[in-house]
């Protein structure tokens, strides 16, 4: 499981990533996931600590994502960044099917095994599959650029840092998780005790983000509702009610798995907080109520 990593904090990692991404590409990069969460809620925990080694960089717009990935990959590889090959999957060639290519994960030359970036793509218009792969070419070989169908929701309304990088906003990331699992992905997560289904981690992350938001501000309800309404109106015009129902279905899927989701969260974004299972249950219930107010 992910555990807090001494010496790694969101502020310094975001700055280091920004300095390595060419200025011409920064507007096309959105930081999502754990580092975005740690940054958004740094005032809640009193620390910038990041409970992951994996820094997800989503490349947008979708139509230019492959070109951006190849340009950024070339820059980082030439700068001495080293590819990481989980599960022994090596770079592919022209004969390798797209969905068998490894994602492009790169560690900076001065960080050893401390952290790495992983390149993702904004989903193309009309993507229906949970995960879609596109091929990117590098001097090292071919890699896959994955896109998840609701990642466009996750990066809606992203904050822009002084460096020019964008950082995803928690309510948007939470909504993307809920929509993704309106039909829960029950693929077992290898490496976690009991091999829980994928949706327990992802939907559980939405509950964690909501717990943190309520700790951060008494205005969390109105802030999240406004963010969700803006995202649904912009991305799903005329389908807002259907998407509301889908989000609720995703959250309801977690009802019988709250203990497992809480255990995962305590080793991830809630690691600095020691949140109790009862508090986590209350957050789940209040998030259901919030969806009903959409």
Image (cartoon, rainbow, N blue to C red):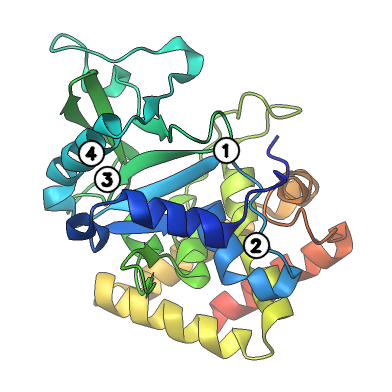
**Which of labels 3 and 4 is toward the front?**
4
Q: Secondary structure at mark 3?
A: loop
- N-terminal-most mark, 2 or 3: 2
**Which of labels 3 and 1 is toward the front?**
1
| Residue topped by disc 3 | 128
Rendered image quadrant of residue 216: bottom right
Q: Which mark is residue 48?
A: 2
Q: Secondary structure at mark 1?
A: helix
| Mark 2 in CB contact with mark 3 (< 8 angstroms) | no
Number of other residues with Cα within 10 Å of mark 1, as a class: few under 14, some 14 to 19, many 20 or more: some
Q: CA distance from mark 4 to mark 1?
A: 33 Å
Q: Which mark is residue 198?
A: 1
Vertical comparison of 238 with 18: above or below: below
Residue 235, horizontal then vertical, whole percent: 26, 70
Residue 155, horizontal then vertical, whole percent: 36, 64
Q: Secondary structure at mark 4?
A: helix
């Amino acid at each position: 499981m992910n555990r807090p990593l001494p010496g790694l904090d969101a502020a310094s990692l975001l700055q280091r990533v920004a300095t390595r991404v060419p200025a011409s590409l920064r507007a096309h990069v959105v930081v999502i996931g754990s580092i975005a969460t740690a940054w958004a809620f740094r005032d809640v925990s009193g620390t910038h600590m990041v409970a992951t080694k994996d820094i997800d960089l989503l490349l947008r717009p979708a139509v230019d994502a492959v070109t951006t990935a190849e340009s950024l990959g070339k820059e980082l590889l030439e700068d001495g960044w080293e590819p990481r090959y989980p599960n022994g999957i090596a770079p592919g060639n022209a004969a390798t099917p797209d969905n068998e290519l490894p994602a492009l994960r790169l560690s900076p030359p001065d960080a050893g095994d401390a952290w790495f970036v992983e390149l993702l793509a904004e989903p193309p218009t009309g993507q229906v599959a949970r995960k879609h792969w596109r091929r990117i070419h590098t001097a090292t070989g071919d890699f896959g650029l994955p896109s998840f169908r609701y990642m466009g929701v996750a990066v809606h309304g992203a904050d822009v840092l002084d460096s020019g990088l964008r950082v995803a906003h928690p309510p948007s990331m939470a909504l993307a998780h809920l929509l993704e699992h309106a039909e829960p992905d029950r693929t077992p997560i290898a490496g976690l005790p009991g091999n829980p289904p994928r949706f327990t981690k992802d939907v559980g992350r939405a509950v964690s983000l909501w717990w943190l938001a309520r700790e951060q501000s008494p205005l969390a309800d109105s802030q999240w509702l406004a963010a969700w309404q803006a995202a649904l109106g912009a991305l799903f015009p005329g389908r807002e009610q259907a998407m509301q129902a889908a989000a609720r279905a995703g959250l309801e899927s977690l009802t019988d798995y709250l203990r497992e989701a809480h255990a995962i969260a305590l080793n991830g974004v809630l690691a600095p907080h020691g949140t109790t299972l009862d508090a986590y249950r209350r957050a789940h219930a209040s998030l259901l109520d919030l969806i009903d107010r959409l």
